[in-house]
Image (cartoon, rainbow, N blue to C red):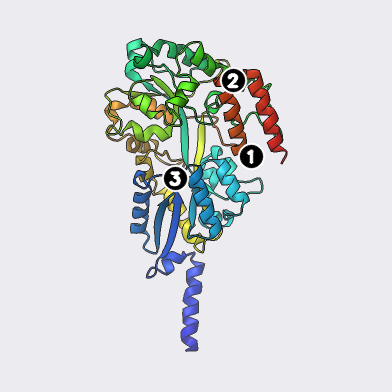
Amino acid sequence: MRKMLATVLAVVLCFGALGMTIAAADSTDPIKIVIWGGVPEDKGPQKVCENFNATHPGIQAEYIRYVNDDQGNVKLDTALISGEKIDIFISYGYDKLAKRVEAGMAAELSGLCEQYDVDVIRDFGEAAKNSVTADSKVYAIPTYKQVMFIMLNKNMLDAAGVEIPQHWTWSDVRETAKLLTTGENAGKVYGFLKSTDGNVINEIVSTEANRDCWLNADATATNFVDNPYLRQGYQILYDMMYTDQSMMSWEDMIVQKVSANEAPMFFNQQVAMVATGSHQLRNIKDTTAFPRDFVVAFAEMPALNADQAEYYADLIVQDHLSINEKSDNKEAAMEYIKWYYTEGYDPMIEGGRMPLYQYYDADKAIEIMLQGAEALVDMESAKNVLFGSYDKMQYDGSNLHKAEIALIMKEEMEAFFLKQIDLDKALENMQNRCDEVLKY
């Protein structure tokens, strides 16, 4: 009996020395990992799990969707606090991730990253640097790049004699929108649209300066009043709405519920250009939900000024995969995460999510992303914008009060766009209210 036990112990130690995972050592009784994410199951996650399960008999992954809105995020947080079976959870937006890290919900992953050869900066680039803390701790692995761009109706551009824009400015957008605005009343086609979501100003100022440019270096105070980018950006949108009338007024957008989804108006040809992002790519090829016969073209987010020294590509790092601090299957979870972003991401591309992983083949990604819609997309402009060669890229800020600041900005911006206060007062209110939040 002693010899048998010694033999068994030696085998187990040998497996450990070879770095075998728990899953490989126990393929007869697979480990179950549960993943909570906000993407609908049929837009990639279910197929990802099926592919993983087929190739990893020692680990079986199950995906549970939560709706990525306020109520859905509360549901996820409650489940994490109560100890519900969750091994991996996905956060959308640095503000939500930061709060979960602060609450101790996310496991610190630097040890597992070393074990599984996961290097956030090497694998995902400088745009992901805020996923690593100053003391080299990692609480989440980012996997999706949300590229922000202008989506254009190429048929309308052609009819107006306008080329697909390249390296343009917001003044160019304003002039182009005037040319593309036609008709009146119910038959009016607006030249431009930016929906009423809370980050409306980010797309205006982001190519000139990094996101959260209104924060000082240590995120303890703001500068809205003297920030030239914000003032210029808000004024351009206001003038397009009320001087040029080439953009729907803020009140009309609220009444018609043009919130965070620009797709219906664009695909119904009620607007010629929209400021949006790669989350719309799945709608571009969905000709069942959005039947159309016009070609969609892409243009990069404009610069604020033609002579600005630097241009920041408007790219948001998203889909942060964290391992639940309470998970009993952290190694299996990390094995899934590494496989997911290096080998298993194709179904997510089919569902409209661009890979952040730097070594993913760009031509393959475009082919998968727009398969079936080639005749309805200007493929050259799509590739140039979605996989452009950018020297500088945006990244989400590390301010833990991001959610509160975003709400304050939205409220004061909306008061300005609804003509309740002037721009000076709106910026003053933003600064005073946000500085109060940052004190705590």
Q: Nearer the N terminus, badge 1 or badge 2?
A: 1
Q: Nearer the viewer, mark 2 or mark 3?
A: 2
Relative depth, front residue between 17 and 420 = 420
Instruction: Say whether residue 28 is visible.
Output: yes
Instruction: Say whether residue 209 is visible.
Output: no
| Tag 3 residue | 67
Q: Is residue 303 above or below residue 216?
A: above
Separation (CA) of disc 1 from disc 3 = 22 Å
Q: Residue 403: which quarter of the image?
A: top right
Contact (Cβ within 8 Å) of mark 1 with mark 3: no
Q: Is residue 328 above or below residue 123?
A: below
**Residue 303: x and y, percent?**
53, 20
**Residue 408: x and y, percent?**
61, 32
Q: Quadrant of the C terminus?
A: top right
| Tag 2 residue | 420
Q: In the image, what residue type sits under mark 3?
A: Val
Q: Residue 232: which quarter of the image?
A: top right
- Residue at 53 percent across and 58 percent down: it is 115
| Tag 1 residue | 401
- Residue at 49 percent across and 48 percent down: it is 90
